[in-house]
Image: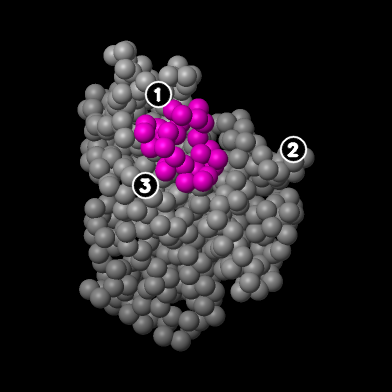
Amino acid sequence: MSGKHENSSPSGPTGVESIARWVLGINDRDLPRSCVAQARLLLLDSIGCAIAGAGEDVCKNVVAMCNEVGGQGPCTIIGQSRALDLPHAVLANGALVRALDLNDYVISPGRNGPLIGGHPSDNIPVALAAGEARRRPGSEILATIAIGYELFGRLKGMMDRKGPWDGVSLSAFVASAMAGRLMGLDADQLAHALALSGARAATPAIVRRGGVSAAKSISNAMVAQSAVEATLLAARGVTGPLSILEHQKGLRTLFPTGDIHETMSAPFPSHGYIMRAHVKMYPCLATGQAAVAAALRLHERLRDRLDTVERIEVVMADHAFLREQQEDPGRVRPRSREAADHSFQFLVAVALADGALGPAQFENERWLDPRVDALMKRIVTRVDPDLNHRAPDAWPCAVRVRDASGEEHAAEVLFPPGYSRDGMSVSEVIAKFHSAAASLGRDSRERIVAAVLAFDRAASADDLGAALRR
């Protein structure tokens, strides 16, 4: 390989070299069964999210663009008839999975309470497309998903959560690591793939701030597409700046805490990062799941009396990031689809009004609907440290409504539907899939479920791909 050791440290491996060695040093057979089983359920959940997201405008535009410029290839686009090349399949499926904000979320333990652990499932499309392109067995694809989650979690732990970079920046390394493992790259090639990918994929935090644009829905997919292209280049001998994580002109500010070599020296744990994932039952931000559940409970009591509502109090656990989310002006008064699913005000108001929260609640700019807007204006948010103690590993919420007579109606949800302590519920994930993929006939849905549940025994992704094509 030309320039094989360019920018490499003479005193030892660089950060990307340590990541590459760790990723390739894991034997599929040594992974905990629970982690592989969780990966299988997360694959099914992500597919359901993609089918549900197909009707979103951003997904229609991304898929149309990929069909226009992408080449014919071996990779299935979920719900479409045409198969595309690997990079465009990653972009299209990544947008489909993410657009509704319905894919799973991770709660990561922190020094002062639970932390937002990101959306590692954003990169499941990478494993699916790379595995299908290289005809890898289902067991290897599932193992790679579990490894991708673990790598994501380790890198997330070294980020400055108040820094300038968004968490999807991690996928520059996670997506290329997953793709490289399934493509059979050696450690040297994979290190260069990671370096090439990192050189162009750092994403500013503005994608999830303020008014919130469509970039929130597709930023990870774009990073992952770039990462896969970098991996394909590295497989052909193209080199990258191996000291990208250490050099003062590199990405030192992306991981300012912790030691990358120490972080990547630990073996795969018996209870991996993937086991911290929870199912989202509502298409909105993870910290809003309990708020929606509480508002839905109150709908039954208030459905005929919403005009009498004078005040709605939304009370959450006392965490700095929750206070920041509550006070973000772009979320308090949303003006886009992407901002609305991150707005506690809109989510609680529309759930109270409709008794439901699904894709339909975001149609026709419901955040501008006079009835919903009137309820939003009556909402105040605050935090309560008592909730921290009563649900220390979750993001609980209490919603209290006072009507014109002074009567108060309250609902409290400490652990929202889909929250899991020791792994996802098979029946719960399957039920959510059937609901999310309701646009498909029952037979089509059952075929997908059967293919995913048997995926660890599949010789390739052919059967699953066939089930996913329209």
Q: Which residue is mark 1?
A: 307
Can the viewer see residue 42? Answer: no
Q: Are marks 3 and 1 in contact (CB under 8 Å)?
A: no
Q: Position of residue 21 (x, y in %)?
A: 43, 64
Q: Which is nearer the N-term, disc 3 or disc 1?
A: 1
Q: Which is nearer the N-term, disc 1 or disc 2?
A: 1
Q: Give how far apart the Cα atoms at labels 3 and 1 are.
A: 22 Å
Q: Nearer the viewer, mark 1 or mark 2?
A: 1
Quadrant for residue 105, please give it.
top left
Q: Nearer the viewer, mark 2 or mark 3?
A: 3
Q: Position of residue 207 (x, y in %)?
A: 36, 58
Give, as a three-letter code, the residue at label 1.
Asp
Q: Which residue is mark 2?
A: 442
Q: Which is nearer the N-term, disc 2 or disc 3?
A: 3
Q: Are marks 2 and 3 in contact (CB under 8 Å)?
A: no
On the rendered structure, is 135 left or right of 359? Answer: right
Magenta stretch in the rendered image: 348-375
